Amino acid sequence: MIDIDKLTFEYVMRDRDGEVDGFSRAIDEVSLKVEQGDFIVILGPNGSGKSTLAKHLNCLLYPTEGTVTVDGMNTHDHDKLWDIRKSVGMVFQNPENQMIGTIVEEDVAFAPENLGVPTKEIEERVKESLVMVEMKDHRKSSPSKLSGGQKQRVAIAGVLAMHPKCIVLDEPTAMLDPEGRVEVIRAIRALNDVENITVILITHYMEEAIYADKVFVMNGGKLVMCGTPREVFSKVEELEENRLTVPVATRLAYELQQAGVSLPDGILDRKELVRALCRS
């Protein structure tokens, strides 16, 4: 679905007069592959390059060097721009930036209308998408009356109405309270499990990574770690060296291991830790 090969991206830096004053490398030779139906999480501290990477998957940015191939299409091929954007939908951290309708169903219908989808099919897509994110009962509501988690689910529905093969979510829970974060992650997991939609979740919340098929960790524009959640979470010291705070259960399990308690590597959550302690 996604094939990134030695992607390098540099921002142009300008002086006060607008003249080029150098380049800043935000991504440094990153390579990774994502298969159709995968649930991928990309972790990293602020400034690690993960959001810049996300923007390459939807042609919001283009590589300085290297290639990004989406569903067999090279993002440098400008004739494929809209086909790529149909295949890969983007959801950003502030859902209000993606909302323009006065009621929810109008907002969800906006993208397929711009794609020229027939009216009757748009109605079906809107209904289908709102059911997927459990927002059907709010279809006549004003977006301004919704909670943060509900707004983000509507934003996801708007992308789903385009019938993408892949959804890229760039820190979609960063502005939400804990309850809203749970709502959104539950909706994302359901889309992946039930609809087989490829999900690429960009986040700095470690707890959101535990259900992924594979986790990639970025720092300083480089890909520094990759593996299953258990493989990555078992490397507590390396994660902390890369400015990531591991979940409390993972850190506690690690400290107990260091104290001589027999526990498996890569404990992912509190329930798993309790089961492991009971067995030991």
Image (cartoon, rainbow, N blue to C red):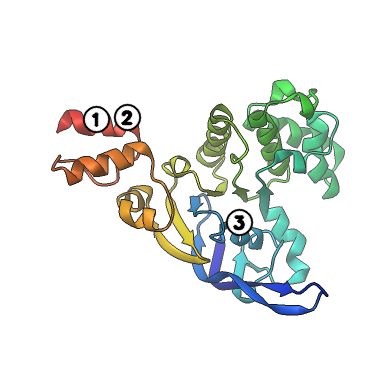
Vertical side of 34 occupied by 192: above or below? above
User: Is 18 rendered above or below residue 271?
Assistant: below
SS for callout 1: helix
Tell me: residue 139, above or below residue 237.
above
Mark 3 packing: few (<14 Cα in 10 Å), some, or many (20+)?
some
Asked whether disc 1 touches disc 2, contact meaning CB atoms under 8 Å apart, the reply is yes
Query: Which label was assigned to residue 271?
Result: 2
Residue at the spot of label 3 = 51
Viewport quadrant of the N terminus: bottom right
Q: Which mark sits nearer the N-terminus, 3 or 2?
A: 3
Residue plotted at (72% across, 54% down): 86
Q: Secondary structure at mark 2?
A: helix
Residue carrying label 1: 275
Which mark is in front, 1 or 3?
Answer: 3
Mark 3 vs mark 2, CA separation in Å? 31 Å
Q: Amino acid at mark 3?
A: Ser
Residue 171 in view of the camera: yes
